[in-house]
Image (cartoon, rainbow, N blue to C red):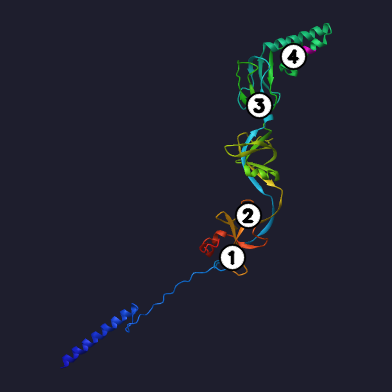
């Protein structure tokens, strides 16, 4: 009898335990022992709503005030250094002959005005010298000034230098050789004769280029031509040279390059030190007259769908209103404000910071 009672109690205890375990599993699945469903509340994060097209930021947003500065609009263009047309001189003769001695015997030799380039023999010049010498001797016996003058003019027209003509009259001797002198100071950019060569009147013997003054030919885009008259100060820099060169606007070429749709602006630059060489790639910095401009940092403007925006601080702390603005580049730091903002307005300094804000998410701008 005792054993049977013990078995019943044990069975009851096991059954009770199983029922409690089942009820516990039902409660965990949302059902209690009463059979009624119990809803488990899971906290859901509510999205922020945008009211009155403002953006509320909980982060530390840096702001900046719209300010006014006195500056000049800068325009940057590029081009090449070239020699002045008037500084390029071709050396030819008005007679034919043969090279006896060549003094300018290397290309790119530096010469000064009056330096001997070559000594040549020309039968035509030698005969003209003899005629002049005979006229001098004849004029000493019988006064024939017109004949003497005619013989002298013939030598001058042939290109014989004045000193050689005077030496004939002074020494009563006609040298068979004639010297060709450098007409200007500069560099020998072309040399087309050698010792012993023959030449004619059509042959260019030398080309001398003077670089005391050079040009810069800067390329301007078509839309930059309208502001050209407002640009007054011109500076030229060349990579590799520390010196900044002053330039003077000379001529806007009356034609455009059809392949690039660019115009060419010629500027004159003094080059006494000879630092600028034709062919150098140069940078032109053009400035307008100083005037006051309302500006904002470039980082404060954001471009979207072809329009510019800035985030204006509202009267509520931490809220910013995206507004459409009109700006134009001033330099590498600032935009000039044309429309949409007023002086001392407070705006977000880094507009890209707002890209992931509610303004972007809710398509405010």
Mark 3 or mark 1: whose residue is earlier in sequence: 3
Q: Position of residue 314 (x, y in %)?
A: 61, 67
- Spatial separation of the CA atoms under disc 4 and disc 2: 72 Å
Crowdedness near tag 3: few (<14), some (14–19) or many (≥20) residues, C-alpha within 10 Å: many
> Any mark on residue 208, and which?
3
Q: Quadrant of residue 151?
A: top right
Q: Position of residue 96 (x, y in %)?
A: 65, 14
Crowdedness near tag 1: few (<14), some (14–19) or many (≥20) residues, C-alpha within 10 Å: many
Q: Residue at x 66, y 48 (%)?
A: 74
- Name the residue tied to disc 1: 320
Q: Residue at x 76, y 11 (%)?
A: 132
- Spatial separation of the CA atoms under disc 1 and disc 4: 90 Å
Foreground mark, 4 or 3, reads 4
Looking at the image, residue 45 sits to the left or right of residue 255; the answer is left
- Name the residue tied to disc 2: 327
* Residue 231 visible at all: no
Q: Secondary structure at mark 4?
A: helix
Q: Secondary structure at mark 2?
A: strand
- Name the residue tied to disc 4: 154
Mark 4 or mark 2: whose residue is earlier in sequence: 4
Foreground mark, 2 or 3, reads 2
Q: Which residues are magenta?
A: 149-156
Mark 1 or mark 4: whose residue is earlier in sequence: 4
- Spatial separation of the CA atoms under disc 4 and disc 3: 26 Å
Mark 1 or mark 2: whose residue is earlier in sequence: 1
Q: Residue furthest left?
A: 1
Foreground mark, 3 or 1, reads 1
The C terminus lies in which quarter of the figure? Answer: bottom right
Q: Answer yes or no: do the residues labelled 1 and 4 have beta carbons within 8 Å?
A: no
Mark 4 or mark 3: whose residue is earlier in sequence: 4
């Amino acid at each position: 009898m005792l054993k049977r009672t013990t078995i019943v109690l044990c069975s009851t205890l096991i059954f009770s335990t199983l029922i409690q375990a089942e009820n516990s599993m039902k409660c965990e699945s949302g059902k209690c022992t009463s059979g009624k469903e119990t809803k488990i509340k899971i906290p859901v994060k509510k999205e922020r709503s945008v009211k009155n097209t403002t953006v509320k930021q909980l982060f530390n947003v840096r702001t900046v005030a719209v300010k006014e500065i006195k500056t000049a609009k800068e325009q940057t263009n590029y081009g090449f250094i070239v020699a002045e047309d008037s500084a390029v001189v071709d050396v030819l003769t008005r007679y034919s002959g043969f090279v006896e001695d060549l003094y300018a015997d290397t290309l790119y030799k530096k010469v000064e005005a009056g330096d001997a380039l070559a000594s040549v023999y020309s039968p035509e010049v030698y005969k003209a010298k003899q005629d002049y010498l005979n006229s001098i001797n004849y004029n000493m016996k019988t006064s024939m000034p017109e004949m003497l003058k005619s013989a002298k003019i013939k030598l001058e027209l042939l290109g014989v230098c004045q000193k050689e003509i005077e030496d004939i009259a002074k020494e009563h001797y006609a040298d068979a050789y004639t010297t060709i002198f450098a007409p200007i100071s500069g560099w020998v950019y072309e040399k087309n004769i050698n010792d012993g060569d023959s030449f004619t009147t059509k042959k260019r013997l030398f080309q001398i280029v003077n670089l005391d003054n050079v040009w810069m030919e800067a390329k301007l885009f078509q839309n930059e031509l309208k502001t050209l008259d407002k640009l007054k100060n011109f500076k030229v820099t060349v990579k590799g040279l520390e010196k900044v060169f002053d330039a003077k606007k000379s001529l806007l070429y009356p034609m455009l390059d059809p392949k690039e749709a660019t115009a060419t602006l010629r500027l004159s630059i003094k080059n006494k030190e000879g630092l600028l060489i034709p062919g150098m790639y140069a940078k032109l910095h053009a400035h307008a007259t100083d005037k006051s401009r309302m500006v904002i940092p470039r980082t404060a403007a954001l471009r979207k769908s072809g329009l510019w925006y800035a985030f204006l601080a509202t009267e509520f702390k931490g809220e910013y209103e995206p507004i459409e603005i009109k700006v134009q580049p001033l330099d590498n730091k600032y935009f000039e404000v044309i429309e949409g903002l007023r002086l001392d307005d407070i705006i977000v300094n880094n507009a890209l910071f707002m890209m992931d804000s509610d303004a972007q998410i809710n398509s405010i701008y």
